[in-house]
Image (tube, grey):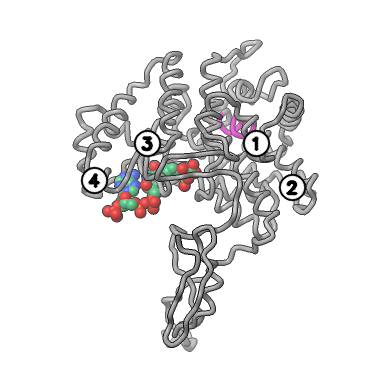
Amino acid sequence: MAKTLYVRSGSEEHELAVTDGTIRASDLRRISTDAGPLATYDPGLLNTASCRSSITYIDGDAGILEYRGYPIEQLAEKSTYLEVAYLLLKGELPNAAQLATWENEVNHHRLVHENAKDIITKSRYDSHPMGKLMSAVASLHAFYPSSRNITDACERELNMVRLLAKMPTLAAFAYRHSLGRNYVYPSDELGFVENFLSMLFKRQERHFIADERLVRAIDVLFILHADHEQNCSTNAVRAVASAGNDPYTSAVAGIAALFGPLHGGANEAVLKMLSEIGSVDRVPEFIEGVKAGQAKLMGFGHRVYKNYDPRARIIKKSADEVFEVTGVNPRLAIAQELERIALNDEYFVSRKLYPNVDFYSGLIYEALKFPPAMFTVMFAVPRTAGWVAQWQEGVLDPEQKITRPKQIYTGLRGRDYAALDAR
Ligand code: SDX
């Protein structure tokens, strides 16, 4: 395994240390080129490590995902989202006393300031809930100005819990606002997921009772979506954090990035794709269109996983449990036929395109009667645990500086200003 990289440049010999499979890009500056000190060019950061992190481990070839060293399969089977959020933030699973304190703390912070609620209420009823969420979360630092003291450990802890606790409330308010319904406030009698379902779906009944199987399915989905190392939205959170921002302001960047159809917006795009295909017998025609470059197979492919996304495997199991309660989503057959064909077709196999976390999750959310516009909100709520854990790790990393990449300039140079009548 390479420990040193030997680089010859003209008459110069350079030795570059290789650590953890990387060279420090700044070491390259020792090598001069006709464009100045040598740098790397890596659009999309395909082959660039931006940080050291101990939160999430992924082996894309082997299809391995671990949070703080615990396999996602074990956490999905045995843990809860709140317990996993504690693990991501603090690095260890809580004991019974720590978990009880943690759950009480999150419960305590589920309410939002009425002015933050009003931001959602004042938005267009039919604006996308991700936009409503961005606006409301962007306002939160104003209610907690001391959250800007990011070097204060107590402030960091308090505002990470506040954000984690308030996301379901804001998400539910955004949903109810789109329906023109009254808001349901958090209830201390309900656990994290049940309370979220109550804020979303409670009507006039005195007590909201959710089917235990649905509560468990959402808890598992939340565990699966909690973190995923340096994905696009987490990278955005870290970049905004690197300028010295509080967790609320940094999380807005995460919500914005996640909204993209190539990222968290893919679950909404999958359902749109399935409804456009319409029936199983039209799948082959759609697949030919993808291979001809006319469309992407949404919910397939991944920057890191060149194997089956382990989360997609678990979500498929959760889907069966949800469909026991809701009835099978008729689009499931189309999704299964798409997967069957794609996994055997050279175009997808050669590009190592497998179902990712977004391929089946939308089918569950649709079966739970969420509108497609809410699917990415269902991704943003649990991903907040990962965003705040990564935000804090970046803030505390002594190696981190404000994110400011280089560029390769391709424009014109040294032009003289021309007066208006001379143009
Ligand atoms: C998430 O990073 C994370 O961890 C993200 C995430 C998380 O938890 O945070 O896992 C969540 O974002 C999952 C991904 C959800 N997105 C989608 O399902 C959208 C569809 N997928 C693609 O757009 C794509 O696969 C990406 C964006 C996910 C990954 O893109 P890459 O790594 O930049 O790969 P690429 O675009 O360079 O593709 C390589 C080849 C290309 O073909 P050629 O140009 O070589 O001929 O594969 C093709 C692509 O055209 N390809 C696809 C495809 N994905 C890649 N072809 C058809 N359908 C697809 N979905």
Q: Give the secondary structure at mark 4.
A: helix
- In three-dimensional space, the C-alpha distance between marks 4 and 2, rounded to whole angstroms, equals 50 Å
Write the start and end of the magenta stretch as one range: 167-175
Q: Look at discs 2 and 1 and give the one toward the viewer.
A: 1
Q: Give the secondary structure at mark 3.
A: helix
Label 4 within 8 A of ligand 1 by Cβ = yes
Label 1 crowd bin: few (<14), some (14–19), many (20+), radius 10 Å: some
- Residue drawn at the location 44% of the way across and 64% of the way down: 42
Query: Is tag 2's residue or tag 1's residue first in the polypeptide sequence?
Result: 1
Q: Give the secondary structure at mark 1.
A: helix
Query: Answer yes or no: do the residues labelled 3 and 4 have beta carbons within 8 Å?
Result: no
Among all residues in the image, which is located at the extreme top? 206
> Circle 2 sits on which residue?
142
User: Would you place residue 46 above or below residue 318 in this image?
Assistant: below
The answer to whether any part of residue 408 appears in the image is yes
Q: Give the secondary structure at mark 2.
A: helix
Is 206 inside the magenta-drawn segment? no
- In three-dimensional space, the C-alpha distance between marks 3 and 1, rounded to whole angstroms, equals 31 Å
> Circle 3 sits on which residue?
270
Query: Answer yes or no: do the residues labelled 4 and 1 have beta carbons within 8 Å?
Result: no
Q: Look at discs 3 and 2 and give the one toward the viewer.
A: 3
Q: Look at discs 3 and 4 and give the one toward the viewer.
A: 4
Q: Amino acid at mark 3?
A: Val
Label 3 crowd bin: few (<14), some (14–19), many (20+), radius 10 Å: many
